[in-house]
Amino acid sequence: MRKAEVFRDGIFAGFLTEENRKSYIFRYDAPYFADKDMPAISLTLPKTQQEYRCEVLFPFFYNMLSEGVNRELQCKQLKIDEVDNFGLLLTTARCDTIGAITVKPVESI
């Protein structure tokens, strides 16, 4: 199981978890959810107290990944399996993303 913290404009919004390659969970952090001024991170992931589950990496997060030759180069340079979407997201979405969302791995203790 791998887990990531999801930030919107540098503010912690929730956790994204990969239970296995066919089970993903996103859950908003309680303080972020309670703050009415904070928007949802995506139109497809509206703010709710319940967790979202998906059999593939949520399309919103998948669309943060490179495609084609850029993806191949990233995977080769970073030594990441090309089918490891979650691993690629954890490595490439830490900073300098196109939108307001960044994703940072939770280091296991």
Image (tube, rainbow, N blue to C red):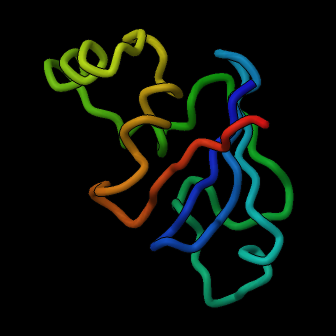
Q: Nearer the viewer, residue 65 or 94?
A: 94
Q: Nearer the viewer, residue 62 or 77?
A: 77
On screen, residue 87 above or below 5: above
Residue in view at x 22 percent, y 15 percent: 72
Quadrant (top left, top right, bottom left, bottom right) of the C terminus:
top right
Quadrant (top left, top right, bottom left, bottom right) of the N terminus:
top right
On screen, residue 94 above or below 48: above
Q: Nearer the viewer, residue 29 or 60?
A: 29
- Report the number of numbered marks: 0
The answer to which image quadrant residue 19 occupies is top right
Residue in view at x 27 percent, y 57 percent: 98
On screen, residue 24 above or below 28: above
Residue in view at x 40 percent, y 45 percent: 93
Q: Residue furthest bottom?
A: 37
The answer to which image quadrant residue 48 occupies is bottom right
Residue in view at x 42 percent, y 35 percent: 91
- Give x and y (percent) for residue 30: 83, 70
- Give x and y (percent) for residue 95: 36, 55
- Give x and y (percent) for residue 67: 24, 26
- Give x and y (percent) for residue 103: 51, 50
On screen, residue 68 above or below 8: above
Q: Is residue 54 left or right of 42 when viewed as pictured?
A: right
Q: Is residue 50 left or right of 38 when viewed as pictured?
A: right
